[in-house]
Amino acid sequence: MLEGMDAAPVSPASGRTEAPRKPLWQRLGIEISEIVNRRHTGQDEHGQPVYREFNSSWLVLIPSKVTKKGRIRRQFSDRREAVNFAEGEADRHRVAGPRAFALTDFEREDAAEALPLLRELNLTFTQAAEFVQRHLRPQGGQITVQELIDRILAEKARKNLRPDSIRTLRWNLARIGEHFGADRHVTSITRQDVEDWIKTLEAGRHRGRNLKNYVTYTKQFFNYALDHQFRADNPAELIEPPVVEWKRPTILSLEETRRLLRTAMLEEFRDLLPALVLQLFVGGLRTEETNRLKWSSINLTARTVDIDPAVGKNRRDGDWRIATIPENAAAFLLTHQPRRGDVTPARYKDRMTALHKAAGFSDYDATHKNAKRHSFGSYGCKLHGAAWVQEQMGHNTRPTFLKFYRHAKITPEEAKEYFEISPANLGGVADVIDIARSA
C-alpha cells in the first residue's frame, strides 16, 4: 500500500475488498514528486555532459485551483516530511477552504505573535491595519519636514502674504526643521517628540511670549499637515502654551523722548527722523506700518496721514484710518528733505536699533521696541481722551485698548508737554533751530 493511502475497505455485501481510497491531499490535486539530484562531473568521450546522482528530494506542488492564487511549491529531503506537509495543507483546506492559503507561513507566525497584544488592546487586525494606514500611510502620502516647510512657504507666497510675515514664518519653520530634522518624515514625529522639544527650549531659558510663539508655530505646522492629509493627527494639539503674564506697557518719559529725537537729529541718523517722529506722535504707527508708508500718504498741509489697508496691520479686514499730524510733529517733518518715496531708509530696522542704542537704550529690542506706540496711546489718552486715541490708533478692541493706556501713570500736564516737543524747544543739538527755520 502506498504511504499516505487510506486502508482498503471491505464490502459487506460481496465480501470483496474494494480499491483503496485516495487520501484527501491527492483528491485535491496536490502532487508529490521525486526529484533526483545530480551533480555535473564533466564530459564523456563524445563531449556530452556527465552527471552523478547522489540523492533525492521530494517536491510538494499545491495547484492554484486549490489556493485560488499562485501555486505553492515546497521541497523536502524526506518523503515522509513531504507527505506530512501535504496532509496538513489538505486538512487546512478542508477546514477553511482557499482562505487557508491566504497567509504565508511568515504572515501566520507574525499574526500569532501580534494577536495577544491586539486582544489586550481590544482591537481586531482590521482596526489595527486601518489605524496604521491613517497614521503611517496618510492619504496625502509621505512628506519630509523640509518638503512640508517648502510647501507652506510657497502657499503663503501665492496668497500674497506680506514679505515681513513670510520672513517671520520662514524663521520659525526653520527652527522646527533644525530640531526634528529636515529629512525626517512628518508622520514619524510623536507628541512625546514635541513635548521633549518644548522642554529643551525651556531648559534653554526660552520663556513667556517667546516660548508661546514656538508652541504656536509648531501647532500651525502640524495643523497644515493634518488639513492636507499628510498626518492623521496633530501631535502638538494638546500641548498647552505657557501663560504670558501681562506687563505694564513701557512708556517713554519726556526726557527719553527728547533724547531719542536729539539723537535722530544727528547727521548719522537724520534720515530716520521722519519715521521716529511719526511713531512717537502720529496715529500710534507700528514699526511695520511705518516701514510700508510712502511720503505720498502724508499731507503736511491738511496735517493727515492716510494709513490704507496696504499699510495697516489687518489689510484683509480693510484696516483703514486717517491719523492726525500734531503741530509739533509737522514741525519735525518739515525739516526733512526730500519728501518723496519711502518714509524709511534702507535697513530701517537695524538702523533704528542702532539709533536707540546710541540714545542710551542698550536693550532696545527687549525693552522698548513698542514703547513709541505705547507712549502715543498713553500720552494721547490723557490729553485727548480714550475715544480720540482709539480712532487714531485703529484699535478695534476697546477693553484691550483701555488695559494698555487708560491707567498709565501720566499727568495731563506731562501729556500736554509731550505733544509740544518740537525742533524749537528740543535743545541739546546745535543745528536744530536752523534746520527748522530753513525748512
Image: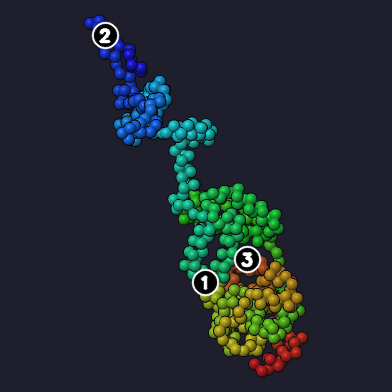
Alpha-carbon distance for marks 1 and 2?
Answer: 101 Å
Residue under pointer 3:
399
Disc ID at residue 72:
none
Judging from the image, the colouring scheme is rainbow
Looking at the image, residue 428 sits to the left or right of residue 223; the answer is right
Q: Residues within 10 Å of mark 1 (few under 14, many from 20)?
A: few
How many residues crowd around disc 3 within 10 Å: few (fewer than 14), some, or many (20 or more)? few
Dot 1 corresponds to which residue?
315
| Marks 1 and 3, the one that precedes in the sequence | 1
- Residue 430's x, y, as percent? 75, 90
What is the quadrant of residue 270 in the picture?
Answer: bottom right
* Element carrying mark 2: loop
Task: Identify residue type, mark 3.
Answer: Pro
Q: Residue at x 48, y 43 (%)?
A: 131
Q: What's the mark number on residue 17?
A: 2
What amino acid type is highlighted by mark number 2? Answer: Thr
**How far apart are the two marked residues, 3 and 2, measured between alpha carbons?**
106 Å
